[in-house]
Image (spheres, rainbow, N blue to C red):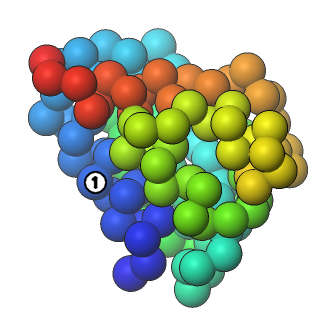
Amino acid sequence: MGKVAQALHALASAVAANPRAQRAAETWSATIQFEVSGEPGPLHLTIDQGRLSAGEGLHVKPDIVVAGEGTALVPVLTGKVDITHPIARGDLRIVRGSYMELINLSRVALAARARS
């Protein structure tokens, strides 16, 4: 399991254990596909009613597809960097979906990092 996959699973666990993070995610429903370097294959994160589920492989119908450098995604998933920064630098790009929708990922990751 690569570092991005580990960070996705850790984020899902952190949200499950943090009521503040659950509230940040409760009104957001989306599936994000990640096609990033440093991983053996694509990964995805499903957000539904405050619950996150990380998975490996292609998702049948992702709402958002993000591609780029896996090393740029890990700090986003751990709540250390807002996703707008690696996008602005060109380390990550949105292949499909809404930029504004993807910003919710940083909001949830930041809430998961904070204490409940």
Question: Which residue occupies 47% across, 65% down?
Answer: 4
Image quadrant where one finds the C terminus: top left
Q: Residue 100, located in which quarter of the rendered image?
A: top right
Q: Residue 72, located in which quarter of the rendered image?
A: bottom right
Residue 81 in the image: above or below residue 40 = above
How packed is label 1: few (under 14 Cα within 10 Å), some, or many (20 or more)? Answer: some
Residue 67 in the image: above or below residue 102 = below
- The residue that mark 1 highlights is 10
Q: Residue furthest bottom?
A: 40
Q: Which of 27 and 38 is in front in this view?
A: 38
Residue 60 pos. (x, y %):
68, 59
Residue 81 pos. (x, y %):
51, 37
Residue 12 pos. (x, y %):
31, 46
Image quadrant where one finds the N terminus: bottom left
Does 116 sit left or right of 48 as displayed? left
Does 13 sit left or right of 6 as displayed? left
Residue 67 in the image: above or below residue 46 = below
SS category of the residue bearing label 1: helix
The amino acid marked with disc number 1 is Ala
Does 95 sit left or right of 42 as displayed? right
Question: Which residue occupies 22% across, 41% down?
Answer: 14
Q: Which of 41 and 84 is in front in this view?
A: 84
Does 48 sit left or right of 105 as displayed? left
Question: Which residue occupies 13% across, 35% down?
Answer: 17
Residue 27 in the image: above or below residue 64 = above
Q: Is residue 18 visible?
A: yes
Question: Which residue occupies 31% across, 14% down?
Answer: 23
Q: Which residue lies furthest to the front in this view?
A: 89
Q: Which of 85 and 111 is in front in this view?
A: 85
